[in-house]
Image (cartoon, rainbow, N blue to C red):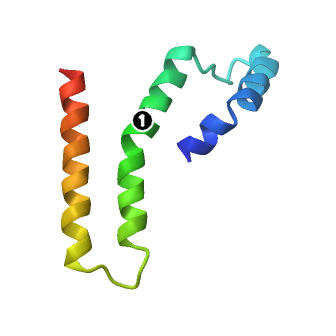
């Protein structure tokens, strides 16, 4: 859903600018766009793992262990970049 939101950034920005006179419509700042990009980048590996593990009727343990290891490596990389 957030990927789609990012894909539609231009039309959304245009619509919000057009509706700017209406006080109930919010504004998406550049910081918010950057946050959305960051969230999408962090969640993408989890999405890919979910697709990989649910692509068949059942997942074998031989898939689960390597996918989990890759997710843990990614998570540790993200945590280290934040410190």
Q: Is residue 1 above or below residue 25?
A: below
* Residue 15 in the figure: left or right of residue 2: right
Name the foreground residue: 63 vs 44.
Answer: 63
Image x and y of residue 58, in percent: 33, 83
Q: Residue furthest right?
A: 18
- Secondary structure beneath dot 1 equals helix
Q: Which of 54 and 26 lies nearest the eye of the viewer? A: 54
Q: In which quarter of the view is residue 54 placed?
A: bottom left
Taking depth in this image into account, of 77 and 3 the one nearest to the observer is: 77
Q: Residue at 35% of width from left, 60% of height from top?
A: 49
**Quadrant of residue 30 within the rendered picture:** top right
Asked if 51 appears above or below 20 in the picture, the reply is: below
**In the image, what residue occupies the spot 76% across and 18% down?**
17
Q: Position of residue 41 (x, y in %)?
A: 42, 37
Relative horizontal placement of residue 11, taking residue 56 as reference (left or right): right
Which corner quadrant holds the C terminus? top left
Say whether residue 9 is left or right of residue 67. right
Asked where in the image residue 56 lies, by quadrant, the reply is bottom left
> Left or right: where does residue 66 sit relative to residue 44?
left
Q: Position of residue 69 (x, y in %)?
A: 18, 55
To which residue does mark 1 refer? 39
At x 20%, y 77%, the residue is 61
**Residue 31: image location, x then y, percent:** 49, 16
């Amino acid at each position: 859903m957030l990927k789609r939101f990012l894909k539609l950034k231009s039309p959304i920005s245009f619509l919000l600018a057009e509706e700017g006179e209406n006080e109930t419509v919010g504004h998406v700042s550049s910081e918010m766009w950057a946050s959305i990009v960051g969230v999408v980048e962090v969640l993408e590996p989890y999405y890919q793992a979910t697709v990989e593990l649910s692509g068949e009727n059942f997942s074998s343990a031989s898939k689960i262990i390597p996918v989990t290891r890759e997710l843990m490596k990614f998570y540790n990389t993200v945590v280290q970049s934040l410190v």
